[in-house]
Amino acid sequence: MRRTEPPPRRPVILVVDDTPLNLDTLTEVLKHDYIVRPALSGALALRLARGATAPDLILLDVMMPNMDGFEVMRQLRADPDTADIPVIFVTALSEHGSEINALTLGAADYITKPFSPPVVLARVRTQLALRQAQRHLAQVNARLLAERELVEDVLVRLRATENFDSRQLRYLLSSVDRSNGDILLAAFTPDGRQRVMLGDIAGHGPAAAACAPLLGHLFYSATADNLDAHTLLDTLARVMHDRLPRQIFMTFALLELAPDRSCCEVWNGGLPGCLLLRGDEPALALPSNSLPLGLQAAGPAEDEATRLALRPQDRLYLFSDGMTEIENPQGQPLGEAAVTRLLQAFDADQPLNALVDAFAGYQGHAHFKDDLTLAELRV
């Protein structure tokens, strides 16, 4: 037996007017399509609006004794339970100022008396359709938000790894959201080389973050297999180019310290922050000699690495463009030189989170537009 769907619920219209004749007229206009609830005063209207079954729309007169329509409107908007009910003023006040006052208070529409029944019906249908669309949009947004949170939770769990080795490494990870596009990877090869990689995957949100688990797996697998840095970068570039969408690429920097920490190789593919700080000497910016990974099927050539002799107490820094692109209230970016000066003046015993306070002070608030990622490697 085929089950029939119940008829749709008829919308409830609350009609508020202190004149019984006006109530009867509006009820007659609306009763064929809607459930009409009349109210002869503002106080009664508020009680009905806050009742068990809230109206879908309110037709509200302005000139009423004790509590006029404007005061009813203020109280409706001040109450979270009634704040989103659409209100159409139906009034004999035709002055432009009264209409502006009504719309300023949040009215959806304004009809002057004497009114035309077809006009009232058309305005009511329009507002009810708009409210239904808004409710549907809110439901869709809530569902999408729940799905995004679920995806982000999966990505965070996939990114978590016990392979990250933070020996002689300090780092800062301040993300705009849980599904950020920055990655920081660190491990030692079996023969004792320390390898740290910072990558900034193009874009933000789940699309960029979804790439991180794959890249992390390749990094840690190649490091555990004692592969050289050139082979690792070539593998990352090939996999990104062949298996990921064309718009996905990654600026990066890779540091590899020798087992005795006397020297290192640095590969930079478009990362703005790649520095060597040595005592009171000027900071040495390590240039970008390579393309970001994923733009072509091959990784950087071997001669694109910068080779450095290191001394005890040297500090190597990697940081993403989320730091250099922070803007002050005048729209001026902080820039790489200013970030370098901050790092030079930074007390070695201070936690790296103190840098976030400095960045927030520069831009005037702590809501950053991009991920802030920094790694500090001490020799």
Image (cartoon, rainbow, N blue to C red):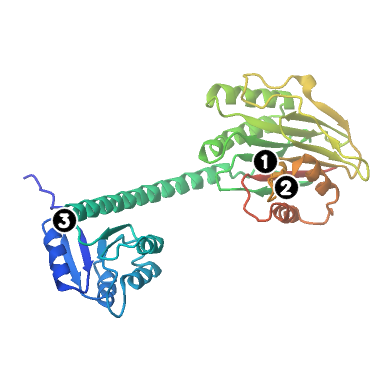
Residue of label 2: 171
Q: Which is nearer the eye, 39 or 354? A: 39
| Residue in view at x 27 percent, y 69 percent | 49
In terms of secondary structure, where does tag 1 sit?
strand
Instruction: Find residue 256 and report its horizontal and vertical position in percent.
Output: 78, 33
Tell me the amino acid under the disc marked 2: Tyr
Residue of label 3: 117
| Mark 2 or mark 3: whose residue is earlier in sequence | 3
Dot in front, 1 or 3: 3
Q: Quadrant of the N terminus?
A: top left
Res 351 → quadrant:
bottom right
Q: Is residue 7 above or below residue 230?
A: below
Q: Is residue 87 left or right of residue 237?
A: left
Q: Residues within 10 Å of mark 1 (few under 14, many from 20)?
A: many
> Would you say the residues marked 1 and 2 are in contact, meaning their CB atoms lie under 8 Å apart?
yes
In terms of secondary structure, where does tag 3 sit?
helix
Residue reaching furthest to the front: 95
Q: Is residue 80 left or right of residue 15?
A: right
Residue of label 1: 184
Q: Quadrant of the C terminus?
A: top right
Q: Is residue 296 left or right of residue 258?
A: left
Tell me the amino acid under the disc marked 3: Pro
